[in-house]
Amino acid sequence: MPELSDIWNVLILRDYNTRLVVICTILLGCACGLMGGFLLLRKRSLMGDTLSHATLPGVGLSFMLLVALGGDGKSLPILLAGAGITGVIGCAAVLFIREQTRIKDDAAMGIVLSVFFGAGVAILGVIQKMPEGSAAGLESFIYGKTASMVMSDFHILVFITVCVITCSLLLFKEFRLLCFDENFAAVLGWPVKFLDILLLTFITAVTVAGLQAVGLILIIAFLITPAAAARFWTNQLDRMLMLSALIGAASGWIGASLSAFFPRLPAGAVIVLVAALFFVLSMLIGTERGVMIRSLRQSQLEKRMGRQHLLRALYEIMEGGRVTEELNIRTVPFRQIRGRRTWSDRQLRDYIRRAYNEGLVEAPNKVDSILLTETGLVEAKQVTRNHRLWEMYLIEYADVATSRVDRDADMVEHILGDKMVTRLENKLQAYRIAGSLVPQSPHPIDPGD
Amino acid sequence: MEWYSIDTWIVVIAALAAGACALLGNFLVLRKMSMMGDAISHAVLPGLAIAFIVTGARASLSMFIGAAIAGVLTAVFTQWISRFGKVDEGASMGIVFTTLFALGLLLIVQGADHVDLDPSCVLYGAIELTPLDVVWRPTLFGLSIEVPRTALVLAGVTLFNAVFVVAFFKELRISSFDAELATTMGIDSKLMHYLLMTLVAVTTVACFESVGSIIVIAMLIVPAATAHLLTDRLWLMVVLSVLIAIGSAALGHMSALTVPAWFGFADTSTSGMMAVMAGLIFSTVMLFAPKYGVLQRFVKRTQAVK
């Protein structure tokens, strides 16, 4: 185990090499997190995968070009430029295939990935047999070398990531509309294709810079995982992007620090695993779309629906198909409620028990029938009225057939807000029967016996 | 170009691998899961590492099983995450395979560092070396033929895939196009999905253990996508994709021997050139296909404007 002082040294970045690696991975995590957010919303998360494979022929070709011009082929900026060029060509090819043929996004990405990577392998195969240039080092270009970053890598990386982060913040409004409604942006007269290519160029820049510094797998993970994790916490794009950049940076920092404590842990792999941990945690406990919150919401909605259905069933049974000023309140047998709804015995008992505990119904003979209380009646009226208003709205404005309207209204009425109810009420004033709170049902009601 | 019997074997082996992949690739393309091959080829690493750490040897059977299990798990995890987390399928695939690869890398560094189990040599078999491992020497019409081990293995895999596709053709077709309809017709589309994924994993592992991962990734997608542009009939698409795969295998090896020589270089990697040839065939078809080609669509559009 490392000493406490070692841990402290790593955390405050005292060691020179650790400082470089940690700062690089944090910056990269930040930039990739940001870009990955846009990719995720455009359902193109695997674009990073395609892109990073598509850089290989560029590396090989620019190496050959350098050798042909008489150099030794190891000039980093030119290799990076070559990688970037084929990367952008690869992206453009994906867009072309997707737009012009019936091949879907995923297959287009796969085709470009494999063909470009194959071309890269073939070019490297040629280079390996060239007498003048040894291809050594080109391979490590793909796999990366996180722990042995040097100052020149650092400068390139910092320059590119800072540029990309700044530019995408300046173009935030444009990219946001591109992600949510491409067609609307086009109608507004924005250069959608240009923006699309620009976004992909930024992503290519980050990918190329990062590939060389930290390797292929880490870049792919950085472009996908933080964004997907952030998506569980919020529905707002700016917050999601911020969170995604934050998660990327945090996993870069934690992973790089961990690998500095334990020399046998490869930094890239640890960072990927830390990001995956963030993802799993977010998936479970995320406050907006996490698994737990969604199942909680689901069960609450089911309870609310059960309660409303029970109350409406009771009301309609007592109404007996006629609209009357005064409802005659009477006890309703379970059998009749079951006839109105397709509930199992257990569900029915469950809903009744809940309503009983809330004081909405009481059970005078204790055995097989229930009676609405005062509060229950008020709420039952409200619920039934909402349902009928919805039915009328659907018939009037959405052209739903009268025979189907009961079921359709059933599916939407529980999510109706108070404001909407008021608006519907005003619109449907004409349908209201004078003096009665509850309008007449537009369709015959099955008595349930 | 000088052609030896070894070159014939390389083409045969490449064609077998390509055919096996293309057969299954049709259904991956139709199910919008084309990137599965790429995902599996990275995700098998922990399976290989665990098999190696447990058995302590580079025995090919145990590693094959480990890799195949890891491949199936990739499909299962991807499905889970996209279903329970409501995450886009591509994103969940990406998360799963990068995580598994990182895990595998960690296991290799921790448990098997001192022996030669380095990811690049496990992941990329070399097709050029396969004909050297001869296991069977039958004599046909007075000719003695030296059959390499890989050819036998891949012939088995191809045959198995062909039998699977033919036997379950109806089920695969319905569940690929309309999973809900398949369920109402009494076909277990989830079972079909996992069967297909298992076969993809096994085929992928069997192929890139011998011929390299790039052939697998390319041949799972490109021939099927090309055939998809040529026809609307599934059976024809399957047949065409296999033919295209075999064609790119043969062209790939020939061009690997000849193309670099035009520029004054020595020969290059067959698997890389196979992917490139498949890409060329795809581009040609994409431009000139009779019904769905880019030119045809362009012509139709201009006619419609007139």
Image: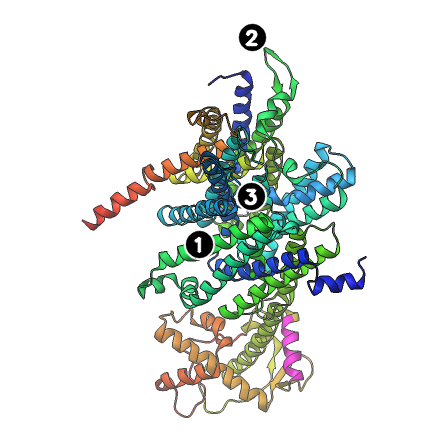
Of label 3 and label 2, which has the lower sequence position?
Answer: 3
Q: Rounded to the nearest whole Å, what is the CA distance between mark 3 and mark 2?
A: 43 Å
* Amino acid at circle 2: Phe
The stretch of residues the image draws in magenta is: A347-358
Image spot of residue A94 (x, y percent): 42, 47
Q: Is residue B134 above or below residue B275?
A: above
Going by the numbered disc 3, the residue's amino acid type is: Asp
Q: Residues within 10 Å of mark 1 (few under 14, many from 20)?
A: many
The amino acid type, in three-letter code, at marker 1 is: Thr
The picture quadrant where one finds residue A167 is bottom left
Percent coordinates x, y for residue A223 in the rendering = 54, 56
Chain letter of the residue carrying label 1: A
Q: Quadrant of residue A288?
A: bottom right
Q: Which mark's residue is nearer the viewer, 1 or 2? A: 1
* Residue A367 point in image, percent of width and height: 69, 80
Chain ID of residue with mark 3:
B
The residue that disc 1 covers is A201
For the residues labelled 3 and 1, the Cα–Cα distance comes to 23 Å
Q: Observer-nearest residue: A415 or B8?
A: B8
Q: Main secondary structure of the magenta part?
A: helix
Q: Which residue is mark 2?
A: B141
| Disc 3 target residue | B38
Please tell me whether residue A352 belongs to the stretch shown in magenta.
yes
Q: Is residue A349 visible?
A: yes
Chain ID at mark 2: B
